[in-house]
Image (cartoon, helix red, strand yellow):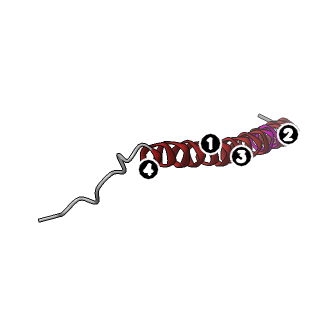
Amino acid sequence: MSTIGDALKALRDVLLLQKEVADLKQSAVAQSEQLARLAEAHGRLRDRVSRLEGIIEGAAMASGRAQQPRIEG
């Protein structure tokens, strides 16, 4: 190949790499947003479970069937 051909090939390779890097950046941003939504959903689920545990424990105490602490041995 000629020098001009080699230079054009190198330029093409650089442009393709730039596009791939831009695509990777876009993918990383999308995954970051998904992770943030997942963390928010996890927090909401944790709060719901905590409220349900409180309701169940309150009902158990009200009925006189509170769970006795276990004796490990």
The CA span between labels 1 and 3 is 13 Å
The CA span between labels 4 and 1 is 20 Å
Q: Horizontal placement of 19 versus 64: left or right?
A: right
Amino acid type for the residue under numbered disc 1: Arg
**Tag in front: 2 or 3:** 3
- Quadrant holding the C terminus: bottom left
The CA span between labels 2 and 3 is 38 Å
**Label 4's element?**
helix
User: What residue is pinned by disc 4?
Assistant: 61
**Tag in front: 3 or 4:** 4
The quadrant holding residue 12 is top right
User: What residue is pinned by disc 3?
Assistant: 40
Q: Are marks 4 and 2 in contact (CB under 8 Å)?
A: no
User: What residue is pinned by disc 2?
Assistant: 15
Q: Horizontal placement of 50 versus 35: left or right?
A: left
- Quadrant holding the N terminus: top right
Q: Earlier in the sequence, mark 2 or mark 3?
A: 2
Q: Earlier in the sequence, mark 3 or mark 4?
A: 3
